[in-house]
Image (cartoon, helix red, strand yellow):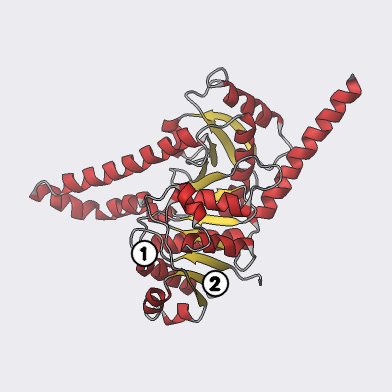
């Protein structure tokens, strides 16, 4: 493979299927002409859609797949069909180094299971984590993980998530030392589970890492803009994410209802339209699309199942940027720092005995 990003696209995934997936790929290719694609799915269907995007066609290769992972398929079922499905073969292309990254808008559980089985976790990583960008009131978005890959986590997992999330933030947010906080029920040091307190103590002492640990944060403070990476177990993180997405939809729907309730409110909408459009843009999940499975020996990006073509293009942009910035190498280097610190501490303890 060359240095230009080549993306293995599960073209059959997502609510709208190949039409939106290929339209998104075409938009991403229009922005960056060095992108190329392996398109996995039904050949006849993909040829028909690809004919609508001549420029994309010149940068794409179709790989016929006779099977598709459904939204209701269990991970165990998906694993058994990895060799025949568009999702499974896209991941396999990354393992075989035929592509730099895989992207799918399909079944999250199946994607996680097949990715972990095919690519395995990096040395020094116990469990991979799902990370994504969320909007804030600050100057930049924030990285949050884990968002559902691991419902139960110990202190070691949380520390690993902090290291991986910080490496991700350094790439996508262009920060030298991302500010990191652990999601907790309070900001006081005495609050939280034993795992959270232990992880906090480890991170507080890890001044050698490329991050700035700033303690705990609560769910209502996530979007304030005073943190760059929020770390959580997958159970709490997924609930926080879904709550934030639901609140965003509630606010936009409430505004829409308020502005259409009377003639006066419609006039008010016209006056305030620039502000409401800015709010809509800021809260639109398509503008923050592209979650990443961190900690694997290869890049796998998850798009929202209901993403539009702009959302798919954004997810592809995230994947391409992670390839260009060599995220996997950055995580490996940070993990080596953690290992070296542990080895030095163990040697000092042995010498003191």
Q: Residue at x 54, y 20 (%)?
A: 188
Q: Secondary structure at mark 1?
A: loop
Q: Residue at x 46, y 29 (%)?
A: 218
Q: Residue at x 36, y 49 (%)?
A: 283
Total tally of numbered discs in the picture: 2
Quarter residue 343 falls in: top right
Q: Residue 48 in the image: x percent, y percent?
A: 37, 78
Q: Nearer the viewer, residue 102 or 4?
A: 102
Q: Is residue 255 above or below residue 11?
A: above
Q: Is residue 25 left or right of residue 262?
A: right
Q: Residues within 10 Å of mark 1 (few under 14, many from 20)?
A: some
Quickly name the residue at label 2.
35
Q: Residue 79 in the image: x percent, y percent?
A: 51, 52
Q: Nearer the viewer, residue 102 or 247?
A: 102
Q: Residue 24 in the image: x percent, y percent?
A: 41, 67
Q: Is residue 6 above or below residue 146?
A: below
Q: Nearer the viewer, residue 252 or 140?
A: 252
Q: Is residue 326 left or right of residue 185?
A: right
The Cα atoms of the two marked residues, 1 and 2, are separated by: 21 Å
Quickly name the residue at label 1.
17
Q: Residue 146 in the image: x percent, y percent?
A: 52, 40
């Amino acid at each position: 493979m060359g240095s230009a990003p080549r993306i293995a696209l599960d073209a059959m995934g997502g609510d709208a299927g190949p039409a939106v997936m290929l339209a998104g790929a075409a938009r991403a290719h229009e922005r960056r002409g060095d992108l190329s694609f392996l398109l996995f799915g039904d050949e006849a269907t993909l040829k028909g859609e690809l004919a609508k995007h001549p420029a994309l066609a010149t940068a794409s290769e179709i790989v016929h797949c006779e099977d598709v992972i459904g939204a209701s398929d269990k991970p165990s079922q998906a694993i058994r069909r990895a060799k025949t499905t568009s999702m499974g073969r896209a991941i396999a292309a990354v393992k075989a180094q035929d592509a730099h990254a895989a992207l799918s808008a399909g079944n999250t559980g199946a994607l996680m299971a097949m990715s972990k089985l095919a690519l395995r976790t990096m040395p020094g990583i116990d469990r991979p984590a799902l990370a994504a960008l969320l909007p804030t009131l600050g100057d930049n978005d924030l990285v949050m993980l884990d968002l559902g890959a691991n419902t139960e986590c110990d202190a070691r997992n949380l520390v690993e998530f902090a290291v991986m999330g910080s490496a991700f933030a350094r790439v996508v947010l262009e920060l030298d030392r991302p500010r990191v906080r652990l999601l907790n029920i309070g900001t006081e040091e005495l609050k939280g589970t034993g795992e959270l307190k232990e992880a906090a103590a480890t991170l507080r002492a890890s001044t050698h890492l490329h991050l700035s640990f700033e303690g705990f944060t609560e769910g209502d403070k996530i979007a304030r803009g005073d943190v760059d990476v929020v770390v959580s177990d997958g159970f709490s993180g997924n609930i926080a994410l879904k709550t934030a997405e639901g609140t965003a939809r509630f606010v936009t729907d409430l505004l829409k209802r308020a502005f259409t309730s009377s003639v006066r409110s419609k006039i008010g909408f016209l006056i305030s339209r620039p502000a409401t459009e800015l709010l809509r843009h800021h809260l639109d999940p398509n503008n923050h699309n592209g979650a990443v499975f961190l900690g694997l020996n290869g890049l796998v990006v998850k798009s929202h199942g209901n993403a539009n073509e702009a959302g798919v293009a954004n997810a592809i942009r995230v994947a391409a940027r992670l390839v260009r910035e060599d995220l996997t190498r950055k995580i490996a280097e940070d993990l080596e720092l953690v290992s070296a610190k542990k080895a030095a501490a163990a040697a000092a303890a042995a010498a003191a005995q």
